[in-house]
Image (cartoon, helix red, strand yellow):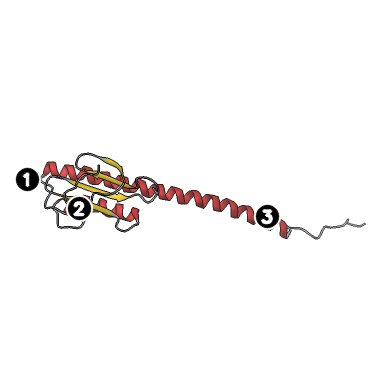
Amino acid sequence: MTLGHIKADRGFTLIELLVVIAIIGILSSVVLASLNTARTRANDATVKSNLATVAVQAELYYDNATTPTYGAAATSCTAASTMFADSTITNAIAQAEVANGTTPTVSCRNSTSAWSVASALPGVTTGNTIWCVDSTGYKGLVAAAPSTASDYTCQ
């Protein structure tokens, strides 16, 4: 009694393994490209959200102040301004700076009666690339952050 011929070459060939590895590589590159786009959009949303927080908190600060003023003039987010000394505002600005990742990250300006905060959006590369909020209620994209000594509005 004989047992038949047993096939000795079981498993995958080298060509089959290389094809599977190539397919996995192509799929992973597509996923990583999509992930990078999603990460950039998330950073844009974080900047917008934090600057919206600054806008709301600045108005709350102004409404609750015993003397309704935004504080001494400041052209920096870290200047000795009464408004930018508010911890919620400084935390929101710090988070926008982390999400932005460029230098300078956030531009802050204020006087005793007006303020503006602007930041570049890392995912926007064409057209207006700066997200700006100000004391007039404006929130949107602008070509450049307010920069002149008396300019505290985004528009």
Q: CA distance from mark 3 to mark 2?
A: 56 Å
The span from disc 2 to disc 1 (Cα, nearest Å) is 19 Å
Q: Name the residue at the top extreme.
A: 137
Which residue corresponds to mark 2? 87
Q: Amino acid at mark 2?
A: Ser
Mark 3 crowdedness (10 Å alpha carbons): few <14, some 14-19, many ≥20: few
Q: What's the residue at 64%, 55% (across, down)?
A: 22
Nearer the observer, 33 or 9:
33
How far from the left and from the top, in percent, is residue 6? 84, 58
Return the x and y of residue 56 as percentages of the image width and height. 22, 42
Q: Amino acid at mark 3?
A: Val
Q: Which amino acid, mark 1?
A: Thr
Picture quadrant of residue 10 = bottom right
125 horizontally vs 97: left or right: right
Q: Nearer the viewer, residue 68 or 113?
A: 113
Residue identified by numbered label 1: 67
Q: Which residue is mark 3?
A: 19
Q: Which is nearer the eye, 128 or 78? A: 128
**Residue depicted at x 11% and y 48%:** 112
Mark linked to residue 29:
none
Which residue extends farthest right? 1
Query: Which structural element holds mark 2?
Result: helix
Q: Position of residue 57 (x, y in %)?
A: 20, 45
**Residue drawn at 37 percent across, 50 percent down:** 43
Dot 3 lies on which element? helix
Please tell me how crowded label 1 is: few (under 14), some (14-19), or many (20+) other residues with Cα within 10 Å: few
99 left or right of 112 in image: right
Q: Earlier in the sequence, mark 3 or mark 2?
A: 3
User: In which quadrant of the rendered view does residue 153 lie?
Assistant: top left
Element type at marker 1?
Answer: loop
Sequence-first disc among 2 and 1: 1
Q: Residues within 10 Å of mark 2 (few under 14, many from 20)?
A: few
